[in-house]
Image (cartoon, grey):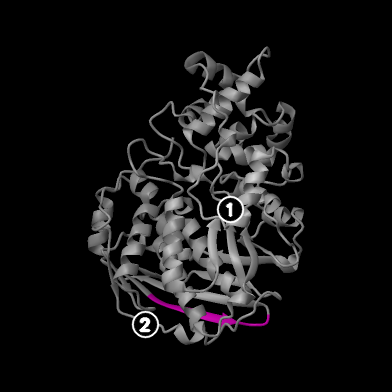
């Protein structure tokens, strides 16, 4: 089960001791090889932070970097997302924005993102606070005028796709189903690893069409974590949305195609709106659509290509994409060291094993994971959590209870007449079989932002199977 820490008193003490968090500034620099972005944050009376983004320069940069107010505005907004990773250490009452200006509507927008994006952190630290009480945002910086630079944009020049690649099955499905042109489209990878680069190259993308961004965490934050300051999950996918939007402008790409599915909308805690994947949800996608069109204003459209699908449908498509089976990785525990590997003991590993099991033979699964996870008795409590037979759902990017129970039951049916492995036997004896009368791999969620031509392509992949 997820580790729970009672910081209900501690966070209040920290708010009183360190009431002011300051977004002081951002800096944009470049040389022949890279674009360098540095943010300056401060917890007044405690420490400062200087996290960075480094964007490798290749032939795709089409806009000037320095003295460009559109770039400044996009970078300033990236900082507004990045700051939450540092603010959470003390839950300071006041957030003072000196680096630029945001209006009341923007303040409301970001407070919602911060509040819901920190839902898991609040829950695991036993922090009870309302959205209104979370922080008081004071914007005292100068407003940036982007209107003159916007006049120089030629919307007709904006074409093709940027596809963020994370190394898991979802982005690989997007790479295969989306009608990509590997000479004109771009993969985008934040903190590239051997696995993510290999996935992009397996899809046919060469080095010049892979956007590489290095994001660093300030070591002072790591020190605070070691000292016992507040820590937990932050909305990384929101960081992805704003960062990819900057690259949409710099490369003149029309579409940023995420790989978030409909399953990302489900809460992790029964009866509460706490979602580990909030910034992957359709609600956030809609919110970002509003924010980007109102305040960023470039002709780049951010959406999730896989939004109409559930995890089971994605797994079914991925099961056929064998060239990725020995490359892809989704395990967060195993990602912390190179080479990235399946730890085979965390909820994410078990979930991926389960969701693929109706569509792959046991030998194929063992070839990927190097063991039969259904035979691992130590995974029973995790298995109960994933299938909804516990009062918690793992705080991981995993499918819905319906999808997981369907996958488990479908696998049991597929193995009829054979001896069941431990977890499947336990499931059948204690819970019976889930209702399989509806084939949920034939659903199509209408809550999506797919352009019509891409909607048709995705439907073809699902319904012409």
Q: Is residue 359 above or below residue 274?
A: above
Give the x, y percent position of residue 233: 43, 51
Q: Is residue 26 magenta?
A: yes
Badge 1 element: loop
Q: Is residue 39 visible?
A: no
For the residue pair 438 and 66, the one nearer the viewer reads as: 438
The structure residue drawn at horizontal position 50% and vertical position 75%, both measured from the top left corner, is 38
For the residue pair 182 and 376, the one nearer the viewer reads as: 182
Badge number at residue 143: 2
Mark-to-mark CA distance, 1 and 2: 34 Å
Q: Quadrant of residue 30?
A: bottom right
For the residue pair 23 and 201, the one nearer the viewer reads as: 201
Q: Main secondary structure of the magenta part?
A: strand
For the residue pair 248 and 35, the one nearer the viewer reads as: 248
The structure residue drawn at horizontal position 53% and vertical position 33%, both measured from the top left corner, is 403
Side of 220 relative to 165 (left or right): left
Give the x, y percent position of residue 346: 54, 37
Q: Is residue 67 above or below residue 74?
A: below
Compare marks 1 and 2 and give the one earlier in the sequence.
Answer: 2
Q: Is residue 206 magenta?
A: no
Side of 296 relative to 454 (left or right): left
Q: Quadrant of residue 212?
A: bottom right
Q: Is residue 301 above or below residue 338?
A: below
Which one is closest to the eye, mark 1 or mark 2? 1
Q: Quadrant of residue 359?
A: top right
Give the x, y percent position of residue 87: 36, 63
User: Where does the magenta region start and end?
Assistant: 24-32
Q: Is residue 200 visible?
A: yes
Badge number at residue 305: 1
Label 2: how many Cα within 10 Å (few below 14, some 14–19, many 20+): few
Quarter of the image that includes the N terminus: top left
């Amino acid at each position: 089960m997820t580790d729970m820490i009672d910081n209900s008193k501690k966070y209040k003490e920290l708010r009183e001791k360190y009431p002011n968090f300051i977004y002081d500034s951002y800096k944009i620099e470049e040389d022949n090889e890279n674009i360098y972005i540095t943010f300056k944050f401060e917890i007044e009376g405690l420490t400062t932070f200087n996290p960075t983004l480094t964007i490798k320069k290749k032939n795709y940069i089409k806009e000037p970097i320095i003295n460009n107010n559109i770039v400044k505005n996009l970078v300033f907004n990236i900082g507004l997302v990045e700051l939450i990773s540092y603010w959470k250490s003390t839950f300071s009452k006041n957030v003072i924005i000196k680096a630029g200006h945001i209006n009341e509507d923007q303040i409301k927008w970001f407070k919602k993102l911060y509040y819901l994006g920190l839902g898991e952190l609040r829950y695991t630290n036993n922090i009870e606070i309302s959205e209104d009480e979370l922080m008081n945002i004071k914007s005292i910086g100068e407003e940036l005028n982007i209107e003159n630079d916007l006049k120089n944009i030629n919307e007709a020049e904006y074409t093709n796709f940027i596809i963020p690649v994370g190394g898991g099955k979802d982005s690989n499905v997007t790479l295969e189903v989306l009608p990509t042109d590997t000479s004109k489209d771009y993969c985008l990878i934040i903190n590239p690893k051997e696995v993510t680069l290999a996935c992009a190259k397996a899809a046919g993308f060469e080095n010049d069409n892979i956007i590489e961004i290095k994001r660093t965490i300030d070591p002072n934050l790591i020190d605070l974590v070691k000292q016992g300051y507040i820590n937990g999950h932050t909305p990384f996918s929101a960081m992805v949305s704003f960062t990819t939007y900057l690259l949409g402008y710099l490369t003149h790409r029309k579409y940023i195609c995420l790989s978030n599915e409909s399953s990302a909308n489900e809460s992790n805690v029964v009866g509460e709106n706490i979602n580990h994947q909030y910034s992957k949800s359709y609600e956030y996608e809609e919110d970002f659509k509003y924010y980007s069109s109102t305040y960023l204003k470039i002709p780049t459209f951010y959406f999730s290509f896989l939004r109409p699908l559930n995890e089971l449908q994605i797994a079914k498509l991925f099961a056929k994409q064998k060239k990725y089976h020995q490359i892809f990785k989704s395990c967060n525990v195993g990602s912390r060291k190179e080479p990235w590997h399946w730890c085979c003991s965390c909820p994410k590993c078990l979930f991926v094993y389960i969701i693929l099991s109706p569509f792959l033979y046991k030998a194929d699964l063992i070839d990927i994971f190097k063991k039969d996870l259904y035979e691992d008795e130590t995974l029973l409590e995790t298995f109960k959590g994933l299938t909804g037979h516990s009062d918690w759902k793992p705080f991981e990017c995993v499918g819905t209870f319906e999808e997981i129970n369907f996958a488990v039951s479908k696998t049991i049916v597929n193995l009829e007449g054979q001896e069941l492995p431990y977890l499947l036997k336990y499931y059948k004896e204690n819970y019976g079989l889930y209702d399989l009368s509806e084939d949920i791999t034939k659903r199509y969620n209408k809550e999506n932002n797919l352009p019509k031509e891409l909607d048709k392509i995705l439907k073809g992949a699902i319904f012409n199977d």
